[in-house]
Amino acid sequence: MQLFRIEVDDDNREIVKYKSGDFPFLIYTDEFRLFDEGYIRWHWHKDLQISYVLNDDICFQVGGKEIVLVPGEGIVFNSNVLHQIKPVNYNCKMISIMFDQSLITGSEHSLIRKKYVDAVINTNNLDFVVLKRDIDWQNEILKYIEQTNSAYNSPDYGYELEIVNNINWIWLKLIRNLKDKIQSPPKKVSPDDERVKTAINYIKANYTHEISLDDIAKSCNISKSECCRSFKRVLKMTPFEYLMEYRVLKATEYLYNTDESISNICMNVGFNGISYFGKTFKKFMNCTPSEYRNYIKNNKNVPSNK
């Protein structure tokens, strides 16, 4: 077994690496037991994403909401939407489909892009769409997801055309059934997402130093109380909890990639005391730093089929 983490840039935007630049499409199976963090932390990406639950329940956090989906259900994430994905248990699996809008639109200046893709990507009425089996049009999309996954993993001659056809059918189902939302006047925009993104970037740049709530609030030009409310509404946690979690996740990178002592790692990621570091690490990772390092040593170099 080999452990994985998603790769993000300096703005917490996921870096999606397509196999081919002229076919911007990717499917992979997320096995949460293979993620060194155990879940997919808060991030966003310009690419469109469809997730399909394979086994056990998975919690998707987006737009200040928590959506728990069961096997056979799915969710579509719009472009640049902040989200996090956590398994209900260790053995959860899901399919992730990532694709650039050009797979549907073709030409950058095409009518299809302006009328049917940009209209979806640019609306703030449609951050995500949940796909359930008991709604006919959503069930049809779920079937197209299954067909697309089969075509991708057992490619026959012309499988790329089959995938493009399926994605277009999925998109057609979405825009026809969500027409009212797409064409509705924009809802009043909450500044929460942008505030939280700014604060996250500040934390990422300064987590090794002492950071106060006042520092985080000033980074996005709001009061401490409003900063806490924004984090609670979007991430369901306080700024301080996010800071502690981020420091722990950076510590896992040191434990994964280096032989540095745990006391040095503690200081490197901004903790002032080894005891508090150990307690905080266990809170978020369900094990001590030493236990985590031992697990890494035993599992890091065993090949995986991912």
Image (spheres, rainbow, N blue to C red):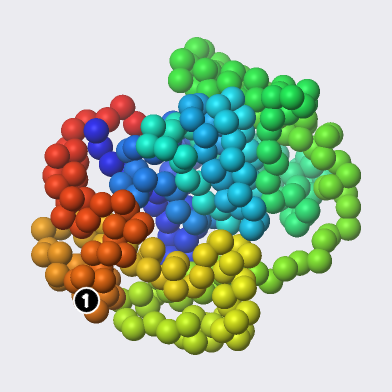
Q: Is residue 102 above or below residue 164?
A: below
Front-lying residue, 146 or 272: 272
Residue 119 pos. (x, y %): 79, 49
Along the horizontal axis of the image, is 300 left or right of 37?
left
Is residue 173 at least partly visible in the picture? yes
Front-lying residue, 62 or 21: 62
Along the horizontal axis of the image, is 304 left or right of 147?
left
Q: Is residue 81 above or below residue 215?
A: above
Residue 100 pos. (x, y %): 59, 42
> So how many labels did they put on this image?
1
Q: Is residue 238 above or below residue 107?
A: below
Quarter of the rendering occupied by the N terminus: top left
Residue 234 pos. (x, y %): 60, 62
Is residue 201 at least partly visible in the picture? no
Q: Residue 38, located in which quarter of the rendered image?
A: top left
Along the horizontal axis of the image, is 248 left or right of 128?
left
Look at 31% across and 27% down and name the residue there.
305
Residue 104 pos. (x, y %): 68, 36
Q: Residue furthest top?
A: 156
The residue pinned by badge 1 equals 273
Look at 19% across and 67% down and name the residue there.
265
For badge 1, the amino acid type reads Gly
Q: Which SS class for mark 1? A: loop
